[in-house]
Image (cartoon, rainbow, N blue to C red):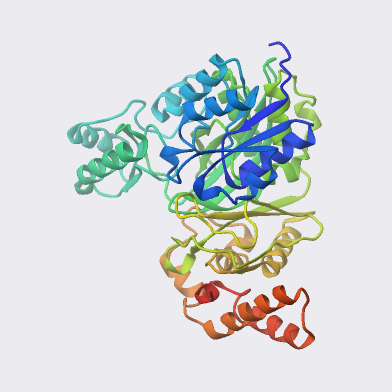
Amino acid sequence: MNIRPFKRVLVANRGEIAVRIIRGCHERGLTAVAVYSTADADALHVRMADQAVCIGPPASSESYLLGDRLLAVAAETGCDAVHPGYGFLSENAGFAKKVIDAGLVWIGPPPDAIDAMGSKTAARQKMSAAGVPVVPGTLEAIHDPAEALTIGREIGFPLMLKAAAGGGGKGMRLVHREADLKDALLGAQGEAQKSFGDASVYLERAIVNPRHIEIQVLADAHGNVVHLFERDCSIQRRHQKVVEEAPCPILPASTREAMAGAAVRAAKAVDYVGAGTCEFLLGDDGEFFFLEMNTRLQVEHPITEMISGIDLLQAQLRVAGGEPLWFRQEDLQIRGHAIECRIYAEDARANFRPAPGPLHVYREPGGPWVRVDSGVVQGMEIPIHYDPMVAKLVVWGATRDEAIGRAKRALQDYRVVGTPTSIPFFLATFEDPRFLAGHYTTGFITPEWLDANLEPPDATVDLAVAAAAIARLESELGRKAPAAEGAISSAWKRTGRWREAARGWR
């Protein structure tokens, strides 16, 4: 592959990942062109870009998912490269091919690699052939309930039904009994069709309450493939990650080496280029199985950057330009411990119900080894049209205990008024004995746990509203009145950091 320098990058995404890409481009002296829907006209990524172009109304199907419109903007603004971020079109092989066919640099893996890993059934076949352990199950999609029952009896219950064309918990069903299989299959097929335009689902043995471990890989176009160790992503709600840490607190060195080796083999099997992630399920017996490969930059990539010292966004830019990796596997080592909290505008006490709304007050924490990746600013609104992520809080510590302590302090320093956030959930998690001991699984969050560990939604509303009112006055005065300072501190502590109860303040 020849070196292909580029100077002007179309950032085909929104929110915090768009901000991350723009910053990375500026660090390399590149021009960043943003796109936005009308709902994002005041978003941070629009303000930070060198140029920004409106691409349509709020619905992603009429804006961020319009590949042809994105390519037209790239042509209109003179871009010579496209970075898709994550989500939207980042794992769309057809879009990647169109970008390349238009003569632009695609800052991502080759379309063939995206295709190979995009179908979960095809990926399972390739991984099995490459000697990567896969969960026992079907290597092809199933369509008939009778066929599913026959295969299910062979595999053994409980079973997991999964959409072949997608992820994020869509088209997924856990089946404990034979009698429930038919309805679960029809439900999974319907949801898969609605979410991904493909009703194909497959069966695999359910690994009940496993650890969810993923390995970050990085490859160039010169045949070099390395891994950057693992991330533990086991704390999830609705099959979506909310807390991640690196490294895994209970993974033996021998298992880490075996899992990382499997991830490197997986990348080589599809001629991968760029940053990617192989996800595995780890059973309580120490056996692990390949789950899927995400052919993009992961939401949780910052914790890998913190423990490895490798800037993955810069690596993507360099590799896409044809440069070889500038380090070898033996140059890498785990340094310290990192934790990420995905802070969403949602109410954890109501089963993590999304709660988009205004950010009347928004102040991020700081201090040594505290990183906040966000795409919001005070005064803006979290739109109802997209994933309600507010920010990613990332902390590093020399030890896991130090990282946990720093995470708690940073969460307590957050100031958010106007919409609920998941901050109280994280504070409760970091007090849980199972988390502190490192012995937790994907079954960590339950309705019973939420009820026992989070305050009722209407607790201390008056104090929270009072704190919000004081904050507003403080903002208008441009200073903190001495008499108000104590009241703010008291209300802040007693309401769980200006908690979501203040959402009633306008």
Q: Which x, y percent locates residue 58?
A: 45, 46
Image-quadrant location for residue 403: bottom right
The residue positioned farthest toward the top in the image shown: 2
The residue positioned farthest toward the bottom in the image shown: 483
Instruction: Give the residue displayed 22% in from the left and 33% down from the top.
Output: 150
**In the shown orientation, is residue 122 left or right of residue 320?**
left
Q: Which x, y percent locates residue 209?
A: 45, 52
**Residue closer to the observer: 75 or 339:** 75
Q: Quadrant of the N terminus?
A: top right
Residue 108 visible in the snapshot = no
**Residue closer to the observer: 161 or 108:** 108
Residue 14 to residue 351: above or below: above
Q: Which x, y percent locates residue 80?
A: 65, 22
**In the shown orientation, is residue 180 left or right of residue 107?**
left
Residue 308 visible in the snapshot = yes
Instruction: Give the residue displayed 62% in from the left and 41% down from the top.
Output: 18
Instruction: Give the residue displayed 77% in from the left and 79% down from the top.
Output: 480
**Residue closer to the observer: 390 or 409:** 390
